Image (cartoon, helix red, strand yellow):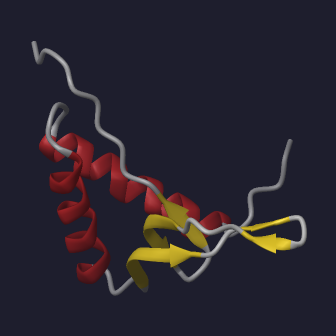
Amino acid sequence: MAKIYNQDETYRIIGIAMEIHRMLGKGLLEVVYKDALEYELIKRNIPYQLEKECIIKYKDTILPHKFYVDFLVYNQIIVEIKSKAGIIE
């Protein structure tokens, strides 16, 4: 079995995401889930950065476009929020 880095922190984040999904359900815009995650991270005093800019190095150069992660949690774990448009039953 592969080693999971930052296992306790990762499981904590997954638990928060599952709670948000249970409370809000599916079909909302990404920004709503981001707001809920930010609320939970603040409430639990978990360190994070929102929309963190990341520089991308490819071989021996820095690429001109940057990558912005939705959340950088514990200064190590990237969390990207995704939502799918569709019909809600």
Give residue 27's position: percent from left, percent from top.
16, 31
Residue name at image x 19 percent, y 32 percent: 26
Write the residue at 29% across / 38% down. 83
Residue 1: image x %, image y %?
Answer: 86, 42
Specify whether 48 is left or right of 61. Answer: left
Relative side of 14 to 28, left or right: right
Residue 47 lies in quadrant: bottom left
Residue placed furthest toward the right: 60
Quarter of the figure with the C terminus: top left
Badge count? 0
Q: Quadrant of residue 49?
A: bottom left
In the rendered image, the vertical position of residue 18 relative to residue 89, given as above or below:
below
Q: Residue furthest left?
A: 89
- In x, y percent, where is residue 46? 40, 82
**Residue toward you, 35 or 69:** 69
Near-viewer residue (41 or 8):
41
Q: Residue 68's spot in the image, x, y percent?
A: 46, 67
Q: Tell me the residue at 13%/15% (across/down).
A: 87
Name above or below for residue 77 compared with residue 88: below
Residue shown at the point (19%, 19%) measured from the top left: 86
In the displayed structure image, the side of residue 81 where residue 64 appears, left or right:
right
